[in-house]
Image (cartoon, helix red, strand yellow):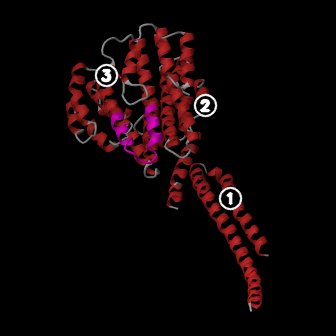
Amino acid sequence: MVDAVTATQVVMSVEAVEASQLGMKALAASIAIVGTGLASAWAELSIGSAAVGAVAENKDLFGSVLVLTIIPETIVIFGLVVGLLLIL
Amino acid sequence: MSAIVGSAPYLYVCTRFRVRRMKLIPQEEYLRMLQMSLPEIIRLIQETEYKREIDELSHSFRGIDLIEVALSWNLAKTYQKVLEIMPEGLREMTESYLRRWDIQNVLAILRGKAQGLPPGKIKEVLIPAGELDRDYLDKIITCAEPGKVLESLKRWRLYPVLARELPRATESGSFSFLENELYKQFYHDILDETGAGIKGGKEFLEFLRLEIDIRNLQILFRLRVNGAKGEVVTFFIPGGTFTVEELVRLHETSSTDAFFDSLTAQLKNRELISLLGRFRQKNGLVPGALHEIENALTLMQYSRLEMMARYHSFSIWPILAYIERKKQEITNLRAITRGKQAGLSTEQIRNYLVM
């Protein structure tokens, strides 16, 4: 009786572990994307505000500040890549 | 989250002023102007950002007067625009700092009235960048005598000081004591407001102390060079890092060497110490050196402003650095045009420029 219960429990634990691993991967991927998304947003807020200020005074700076504003986007792309690597 | 979003206006405004500061006339341009004739300088100024004001005023003024009034108008407009784009917090501090222009305007009107100048002539030198706007100042200019000017300024926050000191000033014909008292009250009020724990007030307070120190040192050198005796305590502005008692003690130091020694011992600013060392070795405290010392002190204030503006990029410092630099640009342009008109040599005009 005791052995049967233990065996059932072991079988259930393996399934639970597999499900849990998948869940953990999904959770890790979401954290990677959400974290880098927030970081990008924060960085772009600062750079964007300063960039708009600079362009308001000197329109010739538009090209340079546009590049600077999109640089933090790379952070969220890294997050997306990490997320995809975890899931796939 | 609100704290993050809340910083965006600071970033926007401070960057705007950093870019604006870069657009001010550079040192090389002033040196080029010194080699030009007056018509060439006027033409050059007309081609810069002063064009709009020059076009607007060209019907009423001619030649150098036109340039002078256009420069004043441009400065007033610039300062009003500064306030328009300022976020809450920074606006209050900037507004209170720009109130110093009210003192300058009121004194210009009073001096003009005392000398019997026509309203149009007084209007040329006014810079309505403070609390008293152009319309209000226009009304005051029409008053016939200083007493009437006082009556129309009843709403002004420095009215009690003006009412207390104006009779003595009109009687003696000298407004310098009144000017001192007004500035002392102005700094007292602004230090009180800033010390009340407003956001970003710490940096502003630091700037005010620096300005008071520079002003006090300029007064100290002026008093020493002119050999002023007697009650000098009233000349100094309280609130800086030097106390009024320390400044009086320095003034009363008998020998020049002892004066330089005690002043250097109390200073923490290495730049200022080396500056004083240079003057001590060069020519001591002769009247001819006074102008040079005052210019060097102003320049030191600007270099400290620039440094603090870089160190605290998103605070009141970049805005104050721009405000002060813009004021200096106008002063330099005036010095060049008036100097050229008066036939001064290039070297003499250069001594009046702070660049």
- Identify the disc placed on residue B29: 2
Q: Is residue B233 above or below residue B23?
A: above
Q: Chain of mark 3?
A: B
Q: Please report the bounds of the magenta region as a residue range.
A: B186-209
Q: Is residue A10 above or below residue A77?
A: below
Quadrant of residue B111 within the rendered picture: top left
Q: Within the magenta stretch, is there residue B223?
A: no
Q: What's the residue type where badge 1 is placed?
A: Pro
Quick one: label 3, few (<14), some, or many (20+) residues within 10 Å?
few
- Identify the disc placed on residue A72: 1
Q: For the residue labelled by badge 2, is the local secondary structure a helix, a strand or a loop?
A: helix
Q: For the residue labelled by badge 3, is the local secondary structure a helix, a strand or a loop?
A: helix
In the rendered image, which residue does mark 3 sit on? B234
Mark 2 and mark 1 in contact? Answer it, CB < 8 Å.
no
**Residue B58 in sight:** no
Q: Describe residue B95's horizontal placement relative to residue B113 as left or right.
A: right
Identify the residue shown where x is 41% and y is 11%: B253
Q: What's the residue type where badge 3 is placed?
A: Thr
Q: Chain of mark 2?
A: B
Identify the residue shown where x is 73% and y is 68%: A80
Q: For the residue labelled by badge 1, is the local secondary structure a helix, a strand or a loop?
A: loop
